[in-house]
Amino acid sequence: MNEAELENWHDYEVGSRREIVSLLRQIGEKNQLIRMLVKGETDVCVTSILEVDDDGDSFVLDRSIDRAQNDRIIAAGRVMCETSLDKIRILFAAEGLGETSYRGGAALRADIPATLIRLQRREFYRMPTPVSNPVRALVPVSPAAGGGMGVFPLHDISVGGISILDNKLQLGTTIGEVYENCRIELPEIGPITTSLQVRNSLDMTLLNNKTNRRLGCQFVDISRGALAGVQRYITKLERERNARLAGLA
């Protein structure tokens, strides 16, 4: 999840101050864990909301157990947060981050966001693809980047599109650019063919200073049969995940 995703989902934006405060309070009361992305997926802190102060225009978050990570969070000033409430995905930015105290202990404070995203539609639910049995997309590469069909591992998949990892930086990042006749190999389901439109791009710097790029792509003119294949694959991943959580696999 990143800034570009918030831009793409503006139709699901909540701008009511009263509703935002209520949602933040419910997230805190239900002890919902929050993924705080400090520097994208390479620096993630799992936290929770301890208190919402409507009059003070702020809310309190639990600190990371890693002191250096807390320093990075405060230095960033603005981080992206992702959680869920009653199976609805909630996305928001936390700004104005700083140190505070809560019930005698150290904590973090942030400004109450002016807006947040509440995703209720199932098609926006993204399922991470397994590392053990990776999914790959074959996407045409421009002659300047070597030509032919490039092979790109998937980061996640939904019935609306996919995120692919372009670690060799072979594809463009122009929002709206369309790659036609892409082939996605779905394990145990079979290949599907569709066009992909770039919707967002995120560059991530790893600890070894190498750059990874993740492209969020939307399916364009996907056939009914291909979409059914995507749905079957997502259902398969959900079943496998639920079995793992239940200790059956």
Image: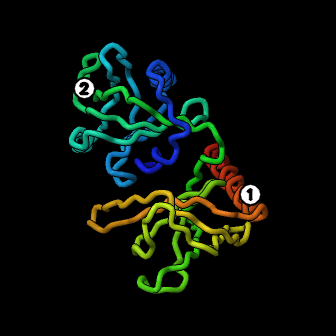
118 to the left or right of 80: right
Image coords of residue 81 (percent x, y)? 41, 39
Give the quarter of the image for residue 132: bottom right
Q: Position of residue 192 (x, y in %)?
A: 70, 70
Q: Nearer the viewer, residue 29 or 120?
A: 120
Looking at the image, residue 26 lies above or below residue 217: above
Vertical side of 35 occupied by 184: above or below: below
Q: Is residue 127 visible?
A: yes
Q: Quadrant of residue 139?
A: bottom right
Residue 52 in the image: state x and y as whole percent.
38, 19
- What residue occupies the far top of the structure in this picture? 55
- Residue that numbered label 2 is attached to: 106
Residue at the limit of the structure toward the right, as seen here: 225
| 161 to the left or right of 67 | right
Give 91 or 30, whichever is nearer the viewer: 91
Of the two numbered discs 2 and 1 in the rendering, the one whose residue sits closer to the viewer: 1
Residue 248 position, x and y percent, is 67, 49
Task: Count the marks.
Answer: 2
Within 10 Å of the Cα at label 2, are there few (<14), some (14-19), or many (20+) other Cα atoms? Answer: few
> Is 67 rendered above or below residue 48?
below
* Disc sitting over residue 68 in the figure: none
Q: Residue at x 27, y 41 (%)?
A: 73
Q: Residues within 10 Å of mark 1 (few under 14, many from 20)?
A: some
Q: Secondary structure at mark 1?
A: helix
In space, the residues marked 2 and 1 are separated at their CA atoms by 46 Å
Residue appearing at x 73%, y 66% in the figure: 189
* Residue type, numbered disc 1: Arg
- Residue where numbered disc 1 is placed: 232
Say which element carries label 2.
Answer: strand
Mark 2 in CB contact with mark 1 (< 8 angstroms) = no
